[in-house]
Image (spheres, rainbow, N blue to C red):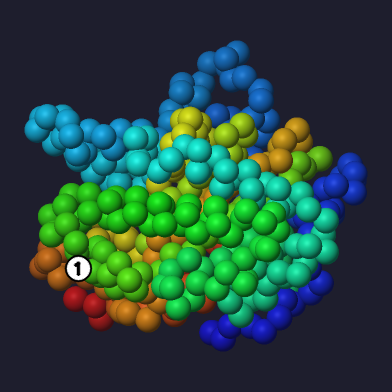
């Protein structure tokens, strides 16, 4: 698979479309029925609508919340219990929220709000940073280059933070003027948080605490990038999605959701659970590379984003990834006779071409690797 030079058809800026005041959405955004939002579980398309008058038990389900303070300075028993809860969240959900994570709440807020301001600038200011599928860096509106693909109801900005050789502030928005400084600071804090979480995961997997960080290339070489998602209001939210179902291809994602508007849904069997963000928390999820390294003890989880007609939504997805050119394969210690290696070695560079070409497609990619491995990886 080759990376493409250009987009296959003229780019549609979803925010500009939404702001044009249309009352029905173009056909290009209408999802097949099987992918649309249904109202049988807690995934109401209207985040402001209360569920209190339904009698569905699932409305109260939420992903686990981990108090990171307990992982460090609780008494021994509390600490073990907190580690155990993280392990369970990784195995059962692949998603959890963290509080007392050490990142300044002020900084989280200013990072989100400076990006909101970015998106509310005139189109020309944003178009200066228009991206291409070659690197995806910059202002974009689609994922994947399949001509005629059904599109998602969102725009985004994608930038590299690590390794420092790829960090080029000239490719980050110049306006608002405070953006570059805030995002540099935010990146630094979130990378630190990512490092702490990787240590916890490594210990829980029975490895040394630096195992995953080293597998990712070490603190100077790991990959880290930020995808800021902007989901405009949508006049027909039940016909489309803000972001189609996918698992994150990288290592681990540290998501800062919008304070006021929910939208992220996590797949649980046949249900979609709407995540209710806890104030000042980050949402953490396992990506495909952690599934590979852990030999599927931890799994990446399918998730998607729904939109609504009343409120725009801004989220910052910080991807904490392996260096792009090292081979990622199941840890030797986690491969046994009973549990042979489920995945062949592959670099993240090679791996991510799939989503960059085909767009979001559930868990198709990591599952196709398992089948390749039936006879060859043990
Ligand atoms: C992503 C993602 C979720 C959200 O960017 O990969 O899943 O809530 N975002 O925006
Ligand atoms: Ni995602």
User: Residue at 50% across / 43% down in the picture?
Assistant: 107
The quadrant of the image that shows the N terminus is bottom right
Residue 106 x, y percent position in the rendering: 50, 38
Q: Residue 67 versus residue 52: which sits nearer the camera?
A: 67
Q: Residue 277 versus residue 309: which sits nearer the camera?
A: 277
Residue 292, quarter of picture: bottom left
The residue where tag 1 is placed is 331
Left or right side of 56 for 297? left
> Residue 36, can we see it?
no
User: Residue at 83% across / 56% down in the picture?
Assistant: 122
In this rendering, is residue 245 above or below 268?
below
Residue 18 x, y percent position in the rendering: 82, 48
- Determine whether the residue tagged by mark 1 lies in a helix, strand or loop: loop
Residue 296 x, y percent position in the rendering: 28, 59
Q: Residue 79 versus residue 5: which sits nearer the camera?
A: 79
User: Residue at 61% across / 80% down in the picture?
Assistant: 134
In this rendering, is residue 51 above or below 256?
above
């Amino acid at each position: 698979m080759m990376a493409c030079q250009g987009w296959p058809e003229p780019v549609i800026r979803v925010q500009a479309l939404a702001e044009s005041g249309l009352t029905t959405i173009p056909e290009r955004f209408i999802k097949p029925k099987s992918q649309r939002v249904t109202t049988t579980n807690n995934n109401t398309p209207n985040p402001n609508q209360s569920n209190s008058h339904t009698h569905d038990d699932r409305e109260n389900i939420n992903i686990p919340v981990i108090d990171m303070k307990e992982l460090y300075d609780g008494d021994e028993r509390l600490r073990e219990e907190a580690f155990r809860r993280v392990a369970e969240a990784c195995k059962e959900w692949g998603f959890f929220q963290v509080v007392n994570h050490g990142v300044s709440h002020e900084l989280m807020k200013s990072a989100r709000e400076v990006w909101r301001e970015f998106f509310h600038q005139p189109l020309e200011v944003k178009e200066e940073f228009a991206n291409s599928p070659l690197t995806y860096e910059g202002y974009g509106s689609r994922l994947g280059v399949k001509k005629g693909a059904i599109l998602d109801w969102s725009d985004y900005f994608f930038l590299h933070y690590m390794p420092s050789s790829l960090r080029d502030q000239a490719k980050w928005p110049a306006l608002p003027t405070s953006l570059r400084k805030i995002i540099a600071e935010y990146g630094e804090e979130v990378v630190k948080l990512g490092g702490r979480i990787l240590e916890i995961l490594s210990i829980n997997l029975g490895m040394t605490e630096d195992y995953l960080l080293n597998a990712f290339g070490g603190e100077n070489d790991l990959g880290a990038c930020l995808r800021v998602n902007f989901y405009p209001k949508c006049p027909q939210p039940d016909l489309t999605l803000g972001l189609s179902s996918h698992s994150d291809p990288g290592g681990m994602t540290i998501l800062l959701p919008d304070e006021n508007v929910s939208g992220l849904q996590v797949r649980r069997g046949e249900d979609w659970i709407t995540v209710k963000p806890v104030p000042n928390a980050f949402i953490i999820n396992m990506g495909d590379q952690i599934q590979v390294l852990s030999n599927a003890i931890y799994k990446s989880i399918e998730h998607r984003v729904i939109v609504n007609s009343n409120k725009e939504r801004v989220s910052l997805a910080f991807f904490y990834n392996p260096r792009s050119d090292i081979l990622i394969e199941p840890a030797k210690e986690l491969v046994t006779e009973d549990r042979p290696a489920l995945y062949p070695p592959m670099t993240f560079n090679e791996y991510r071409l799939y989503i960059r070409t085909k767009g979001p497609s559930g868990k198709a990619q990591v599952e196709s690797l398992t089948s390749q491995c039936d006879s060859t990886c043990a």
